[in-house]
Amino acid sequence: MINVQKLAFSYQRSQPILKNIEFCAARGQCTAILGNNGAGKSTLIKCLNRILKPQQGIVYVNGQNIYNLNQNDIAKHMAYVAQRNVRDRLTVYDSILLGRKPYITFEPNREDYQIVESVIQRMRLGSFALRYIDELSGGEMQKVILARALAQQPDVLLLDEPTSNLDLGNQHEVLAIIREIARTERISVIIIIHDLNLALRYCDRFIFLDNNTIFAYGGVEIMTPENIESIYGIPVMVHKVNGVTVIIPTPDM
Amino acid sequence: MRNIVTYQGYIRHKKVLILFVLLIVVLAALVAVSAGSAGLPLKEVLATFLGYGSGQASVIIFNYRLPRVIVAIVAGIGLASAGCVMQCILHNPLASATTLGISQGAAFGASFAIIVLGAGTQYQTLESVSFSNPYVVSICAFMGALLSTFIILGLSHIKKVTPESMVLSGVALGALFAGATTLLQYFAEDVKVAAVVFWTFGDLGRAGWNEVTIMAVATLLALIYFILNRWNFNALLSGEETAKGLGVNVTRLLILSMFISSLIASIIVSFIGIINFIGLIAPHIVRPLVGNDYRYLLPVTALVGSLLLLASDIAARLVLAPIILPIGAITSFLGAPMFIYLVYKGVGRR
């Protein structure tokens, strides 16, 4: 469970990027952060695990003030998947083992290897565990990055547009894995996502960011045509197709 | 547990590779002790090490050859591991002491000592050329190299520490120091200019046992720091934000690693002059063999650095014996074509 209180952030001598951000996300839930480009979504997610240092606010994870911890201890509670991941000449196994870095003092111990093993099996990465990650496809790479985050054994998983470079099939596969991980591992997942239909399909709660603060926060009931038009500036229709809520933009209708 | 077993086999291969390269370094070191204008067969070298050698062999080996060979090993380890770390923290495959202006800073310091402070009359001995006041030259070279380092770190600190700003400042400083050195030379006497030019060639024979000890201790300490941070370097490969997300204090790692790798390069360059390409090329030779995992890249690169320097030194002493060719020129001659080959073969990954 993550509880964010009165979070505010600005770069030096500039306008505030975030102000008065307050929300909480329960274990096992996926929370989507939505909003226009430049609304501060990535900044918010980076403030949560102190990649950026907010000027104000507190973040509690399971009741513990995360800002009282050093970066290494924060990494034991919160894992972060960046929007862009540099591919390097590391094997899949080594990349996932890197997720154990916050726990490793000099060399990985037996427990570290056991956790990596279980993550590899869970993500079905065994067939290419010793391949270099710069040889992988986009979908495979994203699974490796997720696996590395899972190896951190976090309480909170922060994902910055994990599906933005993936094809349709891989978008659904990766999001289905993320939702399943949230449910079975009881992890709070906070995910930045641009596609509202993907968000509706795989997330439980939604946060709309606008004008540097939270415009609306709640369940599917906040996904109204009025809210969406107010944020994105184009009219939409919200329908149910085979029991699934879908959003159809109608700019010319 | 199938994947662990396969992985441990893969790790075993890497460890065997480290031992294999270590063995080659030891063999190359023996050949280097034996090679030279005063020929010493390998058998006599081994006999001397075991205490059965002739007096003349002992003098040649312990007074001239051995310090030279140990300097090659230590400087190779230091320059290569510093280059390897700089390339990681600066996210730049071209990062090395030369591209960051450290070598040029040292050259300026040495020029200042020789031309302005008059520490530079050189004289020739059996296997090397020495300066009348080598300590003043070394100290000034070290100050010049450190000046470069501090300016880069200072500028980055005033604004924001980014790898790009460090590399760009380094390139600019390199040009500035090169310009300043040229100006000093322009107004100097011919003999002093010759001494400066000679200093910049680089010479492994310049360092005695005291200098060897200083270089070895500094290199060892730097290597320990680098090895303790190998997981952090691996995390940094995935980008700064990912590294922070994995618990790395990126700013501290960047500044300390930059400082230590520059310091080690400065110490080595100030004692033996400018040695090109070792810091740049050694990591690029090793990456296709072991990947970019700093747990293995660092030790293998360090060993390959010393191997390159030993090989260059053997070549420098044998090609036109009894003339010893400048080591810096030989490393460039060996390094540049190899580097171009690696770049065009497409394996010179960061």
Image (tube, grey):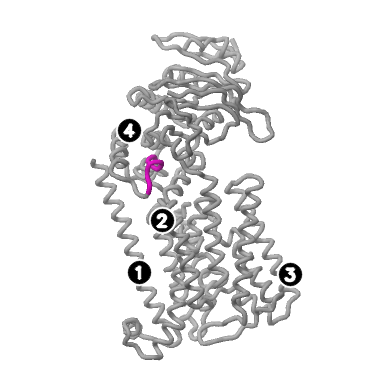
Q: Secondary structure at mark 2?
A: helix
Magenta span has A170?
Answer: no
The residue drawn where x is 32% and y is 64% is B20
Q: Residues within 10 Å of mark 1 (few under 14, many from 20)?
A: some
| Left or right: residue B285 compared with residue B9 | right
Kindly identify the amino acid type of the residue bearing the numbered disc 4.
Answer: Met
Q: Would you say the residues marked 4 and 2 are in contact, meaning their CB atoms lie under 8 Å apart?
A: no
User: What residue is pinned by disc 1?
Assistant: B24
Q: Which residue is mark 4?
A: A123
Which of the pair A209/A194 is nearer the observer? Answer: A209
Q: What residue is disc 2 on?
A: B297
Q: CA distance from mark 3 to mark 4?
A: 63 Å
**Magenta span: chief secondary structure:** loop
Amino acid type shown at disc 1: Ile
Q: Position of residue B22 (x, y in %)?
A: 35, 66
Return the mark for residue B183: 3
Cα distance in 3D space between marks 4 and 1: 42 Å
Image quadrant occupied by the N terminus of chain B: top left
First reached walking from the N terminus: tag 2 or tag 1: 1
Q: Are marks 3 and 4 on the same chain?
A: no
Disc 4, SS: loop
Q: Where does the magenta region start and end? A: A99-105
Contact, mark 3 vs mark 1 (Cβ under 8 Å): no
Q: Are marks 4 and 2 on the same chain?
A: no
Q: CA distance from mark 3 to mark 1?
A: 44 Å
Left or right: B121 as drawn, with respect to B251: right
- Which mark is on residue A121? none
**Subunit of label 2:** B
Q: CA distance from mark 2 to mark 3?
A: 41 Å
Labels 3 and 1 positioned on one and the same chain: yes
Q: Nearer the viewer, residue B219 or A223?
A: B219
